[in-house]
Image (tube, rainbow, N blue to C red):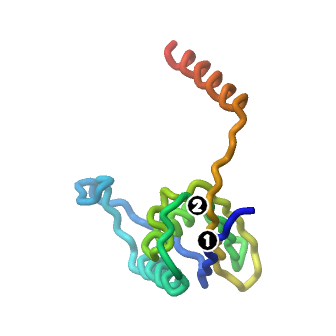
Amino acid sequence: MLKMLGRYFLSFIPPSKANRIKINARAFTKSGKRYIVPKDVSLKINRAIWELQQQQKGETIKEPVYVSILFVLPDRRRRDLDNIMKTLGDCMVYAGIIQDDSLIYKQTLEKTVIKGRQGVIIEVYRYREKNIDKELIKELENYREKIDGIQTK
């Protein structure tokens, strides 16, 4: 049984990272990219951080975690959950839930539609290392050798 480290709620669906607008490549950030975040998007991100901070109890998690996220959507409009997850990972870091989003070793994203309702349920568990079948790793290596042989021709 996995040990739950925390359960968190958001009252709304945070914006996707795709809502950021890339600008001039002459940058001052680590990644060398600069973005403009529209004001309404910035306000929603700040609200998500605030809501998570209100629920944060205890120490910041500094170990690998498994994150299970359920998105409760008010309609069937198309949404890119993995881009929303990128925003959520950042919000969890800024709220002090996890030290770094690179500590998310496993995640599951699920959505359900409940007309007129919305929000996010986030469950954080201690990650347990998976035992990978040696035959599967051998198949991966064989595949890689095959692809490397094709690429060099």
Residue 20 as seen in the image, left or right of residue 149: left
Residue found at x 48% / y 61%:
101
Q: Give yes or no for contact between labels 1 and 2 (Cβ–Cβ under 8 Å).
A: yes
Q: Is residue 21 left or right of residue 139?
A: left
Amino acid bearing label 1: Leu
Q: Quadrant of residue 123?
A: bottom right
State the residue in front, 29 or 64.
64
Q: Against 25, is 77 above or below?
A: below
Q: Position of residue 43 (x, y in %)?
A: 43, 82
Query: Quadrant of the rendered structure where residue 67 is?
Result: bottom right
Residue located beneath label 2 in the image:
65
Looking at the rendered structure, the secondary structure element under dot 1 is: strand
Which corner quadrant holds the N terminus? bottom right
Residue 16 shows up from this direction: no
| Residue found at x 62% / y 80% | 9
* Outermost residue, top side: 153
Tell me the quarter of the picture where residue 83 sits: bottom right
